[in-house]
Amino acid sequence: MIRINKKSILSLLFFFLLLAGVRALPCYAQDEPIDQLKVFMDEVVLVLQRDEGDCSWTHKKAEIVRIVKTRFDAKELAMRVLATEWKKRSPEEKDNFVDLFIQVLENIYIDKIEMYSDEKIFFVKQIVKDNKALVYSEFVKDNLKIPISYRLKNSDGQWLVYDIIVEGVSLVGNYRKQFTHIIKKEQYSGLVKRMEEKIRESKIKDLEGKKQISGVGVS
């Protein structure tokens, strides 16, 4: 199975959580990356706070995935994760890898945001250079502060996230190390096979959960 360490779990969890009470300290114009991040996170919070009954999470999850994809540069992330291996892949293989990798991330992390409570994210500052930006923030819970930074790229006026750094640990760097190790041992096809297996397992789990919600037990 594909594994990641604890800090990397936190990194994407915080990104998808987009926790209630997101606050930006300075005031920026709407074309600034820090401001676009706040608007994006507010949209997710509104979905999380929506009351739709006992079966609401399935609908909320789909809506959150849709919103996240609008602020996430999936191709840039996938390209950086594969590193030199990216250039070796055909256009079809690249498209397939992007799709598989995003599905893996969604299936691992998206359900965790259902458990958000009183956590806060405070945006501290941003550094912008040409079409790249680095936004600094702090995750705060019970007086514990964890630094989280977002790397973004400007695409036609939209600042899209392609990496997250939590306490110095990069999401891209962590997955690149894992995938490089797998490719060396099992070739690129072995990595793809592992990702497909992970996605299948997650779909089976989701299906079993839906059956249980509808009152159909799964042994």
Image (tube, grey):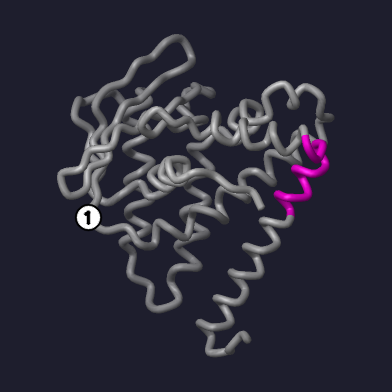
Decide whether the magenta segment is chiefly helix, strand or loop.
helix
Choose between 126 and 87: the one closer to the eye.
Answer: 87
Residue ID for mark 1: 118
- In the orientation shown, which residue stands out farthest toward the left? 143
Seen in the image, is 9 located left or right of residue 208?
left
Return the x and y of residue 146 as percentages of the image width and height: 28, 37
Choose between 155 and 105: the one closer to the eye.
Answer: 105
Choose between 27 and 200: the one closer to the eye.
Answer: 200
Residue 206: in magenta span? no
The residue under the point 69% across, 34% down is 181
Choose between 3 and 98: the one closer to the eye.
Answer: 3
Return the x and y of residue 86 as percentages of the image width and height: 74, 26
SS category of the residue bearing label 1: loop
Return the x and y of residue 5 as percentages of the image width and height: 50, 43
Seen in the picture, residue 56 relative to 89 is either above or below; the reply is below
Instruction: Examine the image and state in which quarter residue 188 appears.
Output: top right
Q: Amino acid at mark 1?
A: Asp
Neighbourhood count class around disc 1 (C-alpha, 10 Å): few under 14, some 14–19, many 20 upward:
few
Seen in the image, is 72 located left or right of residue 194?
left
Identify the magenta region. 185-196
Return the x and y of residue 90 as percentages of the image width and height: 84, 30
Seen in the image, is 38 located left or right of residue 132?
left
The residue under the point 24% across, 50% down is 119
